[in-house]
Amino acid sequence: MARRRIKINPMALIGLTPMIATAVGVFVICIIYSIVLSFTNSRLLPNFEFIGFAQYERLWETPRWLISVRNIWLFGFFSIAFNMIFGYLLAVFMDQRIKQEDAFRTIFLYPFAMSLVVTGLVWQWIMDPNLGFQSAVRNMGFTDFRFSPLTNEATAIYGVIVAGIWNGVGVTMAILLAGLRGVDEEVWKAARVDGIPTWKTYLFITLPMMRGAFITAFVLQCVGVVRVYDLIIAMTQGGPGISTQMPAVFVIQHISGRSNVGLGMAAATMMLLPIIVLIAIQQYFAWRSRRRAAGIGAAVATLPQAQGVKAS
Amino acid sequence: MSGAAISTKPAAGAKVVVEPAGPKPRKLTITRIGVYAFLVISAIYFLLPLWVMLVTSFKTMPEIREGYLFNWPREFTFEPWIKAWATACTGRDCNGISPGFWNSVKITVPGVIVSITIAAINGYTLSYWKFRGSEIFFGILMFGAFVPYQVVIYPLIIFMREMGLFATLPGIIIVHTIFGMPILTLLFRNFFASLPEELFKAARIDGAGYWQIFFRIMLPMSVPIAIVAVILQVTGIWNDFLFGTVFAGRENMPMTVQLNNIVTTTTGTREYNVNMAATILAAAVPLAVYFISGKWFVRGIAAGAVKG
Amino acid sequence: MNRFVLVGAVSAAALLGSTAISNAASVEVMHWWTSGGEQAAVSVFAEEFEALESGHTWIDTAIAGGDASRSATLQRILGGDAPGAAQFNISRQFEELAEAGLLLDLTDLAEAEGWRDFIRPDAILDVCEFDGRIYCVPVNIHSWQWGWASVPAFEAAGLEVPTNLEDFVAAIPALQEAGIIPLAIGGEPWQHNGALGVTLMSVMGLEGHLRLYRDRDADYARSEEVARGLEIWREMTATIDDGAANRNWNDTTNLVITDQAALQIMGDWARGEFALAGLEAGVDYECLPGPSDDPYLDTGGDIFLFPKQNDPEVEAAQLEMASMMVNPRVQALFNNAKGSLPVRDDVDFSLADACMRKGLEILSNPDRVFQGAGFYMLEDDVQRLNDLWVEFSFNRDMSIEEAQERFANIIATAAE
């Protein structure tokens, strides 16, 4: 690119110092430090008595961790799947020239402005069997109505999923709606000329064309899922029992209250793995599409619309 | 290293305002009714919790115990709001949630200013003053957008202790700056990259230096993206819980942490009306930002939802 | 007041006078005493501390839940922002802190005041000792082995208040019939752990307890007694009410206080809640030691440790606080509010109610006092046990045989 400067401007270096310090200090040194500690028997304070993979062996024998891992898959699968389906449905329905579009968008998105602590507390309250939704419905005369997911260890995780979707689906909708609006009008005209039903157009024509928007929404969801912490603390505190434990909660518990930093850092390192895999996959696709784009012709890349979308 | 997934975001978000692309609406048909029914039912699901919070916060405890969750309060009482704001207790401290509110202001205002200033400089430098290696650091930073906080939190505690910044106001502001940096830098970098380069070249020919160009030309032009960044950071920092519990310290305990403390502290029975009032109070600032900023907010989250 | 107490107090004053230029300091205290009874108790400490001549200030940091509070304390110690004093349970959790030199050494104060002479049983001061130095102050003795029964609830079901868990299990159908929650319990893991431990103890007795934890007899974990204990637990928890999830212990106690539930198995700190509600032991509610006809009590309790501060004035205030906490008058006031037993037996017991006297009587017989598993096993293994019991309690698909097998495995592999 033309903007590249060969000589380092000293001011530029000064300007970029905080970023370099953060990138190297936090996202390289701190991560390495955490990984190193996972091979030690550190309890509360860091020490460097190396014990090989013992913490990892123990980690994968710890029921609390195994449940956390199971939960993150369950939570991840259901919340991402529902998020995508519900989000796309909302986006498609919003795309029907709804007069009150702004009002609906406001309603679908406002939960995202709420913190996960607030989200967790509100839903915990709604799911309270004695005073919440269940009792309200029972008071209407449906005396056998049951809705108390949080009281049962088998269903508590689904209660958390409902709250998580409430908080985040608006974002997915906004991204996918933007993607839908980005689809060329010509596509619609062509579909109409061919007499393809609207629903089929949405499902088989526009959906594959919005891969970028879907990947964006998917990646956002994944990052949020791996980090889920506040929601659990506010909503279930990991309970009933340890049925809603999550990896992020596990790590925090072990670097403080449970005083087993070695084990906690082993867990943290395991949390890093899927992220690295995800980035690797995404890099691969980015690399492949760049190669394909290069084959089609460099002209596309110089279009003004490409501004800000360049992969680095 | 950022890749397509993140980089498309600002562009995608910006397109929200474009006209609907769907088929032209016909007259009122069954499909049309179905569409509205779906949207209205969805809207109810989204509005329900807000409704419940509001009505509960104005009810008296005996009325709450009857279990009519959705009903309008029979007897309107402001008592829970006053208690939540000023007198609810955690332990011997009975000051309600108001100290947390001011602490959150104390953290959020400088946190937003510092993090956005640094991100703007980053974006500007990465767009116009690239040097060998600058892209590598940016790549690492983008990787940081995906790192679970729990991976770095322990080393960061140790680091903050060594710097004497643990449990101080500067400490928590630095933490927010660090974790806000990846997404904000990306935001500004993409924005500056979209500006016509002639602008920069002309300034260079006129002999303007690094800081001059930044403050005189780039900063005034970046107001739109700065608004998005401010919205993003205000809601992000205000809603933070994890960093607040770990890094803020007792003196600066933010509102979310205090909310959780008040709600988990009970003497005998849970006062749900007070809890709900406190919850609304804690959510009020980001909600206000959301309702006031409207479409800007949509752009902000589309750009920055990575922050989680 | 005993003579040695007086001597101790005088010499402590002399010691403190020599180290401090009696300047007012602020000491932040972290604890998890947030229920009504607990707040009344911690207020005794706070008020007594602020009433000291030096004019110190007590800064209260209460965080609901022992786990959350201990976590926050440890995080802050790790970050170099340690509070002036922090509550812990009697356990081996803080050994590492003492080892790393992060805690204020209380040995001189303890020797000057003669803590060894009046704090009993010896075991509760032993946990404060590390390498021959003393690093914490025990403030009370708590036992987990209590049942709290609502007399009107049992009356409503036409039953006598049972005295052991076998009788209670037999009473469950009648209680359900009468629309009463048989066992009141909250969904927090520690409540399940604690109550399950009590249930096992009430069936096994002291002999079994020692075979398991002291002698590490893994076969005993597979025994009939343990199986019966787990069966009783399953029967009692089969009828848990819907509201249990997330309910903390004092809200749960409130169910018994308001006669909605029949029995809660909870440590003697629950007594403070009954007292605060103005209920009378033996009339409105009944406290059942054990709950067993052959009751044993453990001597757990709360301790305070004092993380080192760089400020000599604060250090002096910390020592004064430590001294205040074991003062006989403060001990009487504090423990009466808290529902716990004092760490010394020379305090005024005239305020003690029927339940407290029952407890004192049992504790005065050394054969009836035992040490919890945490006394014999390291924290790490105790946590493994806790995790097992929580899983057993919440996962009703886990068979009793499987639980016993895993129990035996933990006992067999626990570190010395």
Image: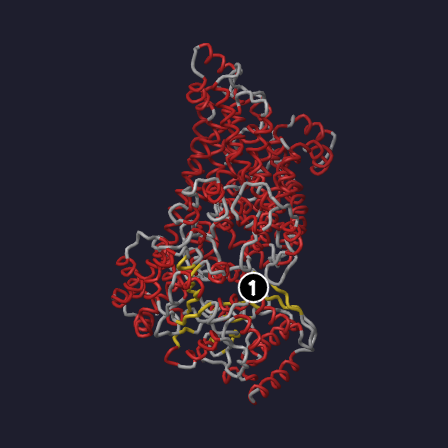
Relative placement, left or right, of C91 versus B128 is left
For residue A191, what is the image quadrant?
top left
Q: Position of residue B56 (x, y in %)?
A: 58, 45
Q: Is residue C391 above or below residue A24?
A: below
Location of the N terminus of chain C by quadrant is bottom right
Relative placement, left or right, of C17 versus C202 is right
Identify the residue position indicated by label 1 in the image: C36
Give the farthest residue toward the top.
Answer: A193
Q: Position of residue C138 (x, y in %)?
A: 51, 74
Is residue C182 in view? yes
Q: Amino acid at mark 1?
A: Gly
Q: Is residue A207 above or below residue A32?
A: above
Location of the C terminus of chain C by quadrant is bottom left
For residue C143, what is the image quadrant?
bottom left
Q: C261 or B86: nearer the eye?
A: C261
Q: Is residue A190 above or below residue B261?
A: above
Q: Position of residue A8 (x, y in %)?
A: 62, 39
Q: How is the image coloured?
A: secondary structure
Is residue A53 in view? no
Q: Position of residue C363 (x, y in %)?
A: 43, 78
> How many other residues sit within 10 Å of disc 1, few (<14), some (14-19) or many (≥20)?
many
Q: B183 or B192: nearer the eye?
A: B183
Disc tally is 1
Callout 1: residue from which chain?
A: C
Q: B7 or B110: nearer the eye?
A: B110
For residue C240, what is the image quadrant?
bottom left
Helix, strand or loop status at disc 1: helix
